[in-house]
Image (tube, rainbow, N blue to C red):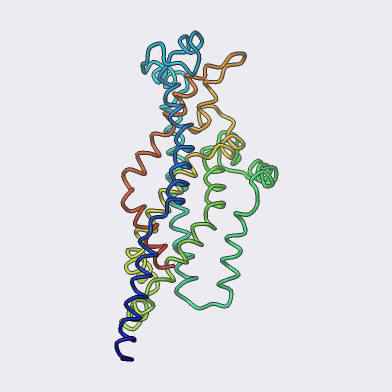
Amino acid sequence: MSTTVAEVAPSRQGREVVGRRGRPRYGTQVFLIVMSVMWLIPLLWTVYISLRPKADTDKFGYLSLSGKFNFDNYVDAWNQGGFANAFMNSAMITIPAVLITIVMASMVAFVVSRFAWKFNVTLLILFTAGNMLPPQVLATPLFEIFKHTALPYSLSDSGSLLNTYYSVILVDVAFQLGFCTFVLSNYMKALPNELTEAALVDGCGVWRMYRQIILPLCRPALAALGVLEVIWIYNDFFWALLFVQSGDRLPVTTAISNLQGVFLSNYNLISAGAIITVIPTLIVYAVLQRQFVAGLTLGGSKG
């Protein structure tokens, strides 16, 4: 009798657990649907406005469905905003900044996660603390530092870091390095220590261990961070506007300001310019979507 009760009790408990897990969560689903719709409304509204001529919106209003739809605003925005040159400037800033950030963060995370050191936690706190400061607090000191930092005239027209890509790249790397180090260190700590211990026994050096063992295992996390960093650095507006004064060196996020009129603004044209700036980030996400999702799910399951 006792054996029967002991066998039945776990089975009932198991069914109860399965029932609780399998119970539909309508509240969560409704909340996610509402938040998704609220997030999509501004984007869809921007696309809708960008496809309408300004004359039709002035005549029928922004809420009407009357009038025609075309891509004339996109053509005008591309020509007036100088997006071809602006996209090149954004690439000159985003690609080096992302690569330097990921490489440096992976090196620091490797040391912090694989080797015992009494200042490991302190180092992580120091790297993460830099992200807690608002950029506006450091704007004036950084501007003065870059203004008085001499460079060869072959690298800068003004002889300083101002009005160069280097200033924006340096600041972006400094602000993003702490976050990437924190994420990668947690990811690397979840990897089995036996891998590196066996490599050390076989005579593997530290550099080889980092390059041939740890980095290949961190590809999903590196891809996820790479997508996030491309989006964040590409969309940066503040630092480029502060350190770059030359119009032909401004990135694409500031090119939209070229579509802003002095006395009158064509919001249909500005909406088309905003949609144009989103296209590169969508392409990056579409190419790395599988790695991005895998990096998020693996990080969540191992944490």
Place residue 106 in its image quadrant: bottom left
Q: Furthest residue to the front?
A: 1
Q: Furthest residue to the bottom?
A: 2
Residue 170 lies, in percent from the top left, at 55, 48
Q: Nearer the viewer, residue 195 or 15?
A: 15
> In what quadrant of the picture does the N terminus appear?
bottom left
The residue drawn where x is 42% and y is 54% is 25
Q: Nearer the viewer, residue 78 or 65?
A: 65
Q: Nearer the viewer, residue 276 or 202?
A: 276
Residue 295 lies left or right of residue 116; in this view the side is left
Q: Nearer the viewer, residue 191 or 53?
A: 53
Residue 163 lies, in percent from the top left, at 57, 35
Residue 15 lies left or right of residue 161; in this view the side is left
> In what quadrant of the picture does the C terminus appear?
bottom left
Residue 240 lies, in percent from the top left, at 56, 37
Circle count: 0
Residue 167 lies, in percent from the top left, at 56, 43
Residue 94's place in the image compared with 88, above or below, is below
Place residue 43 in its image quadrant: top left
Residue 294's place in the image compared with 56, above or below, is below
The residue drawn where x is 51% and y is 31% is 249
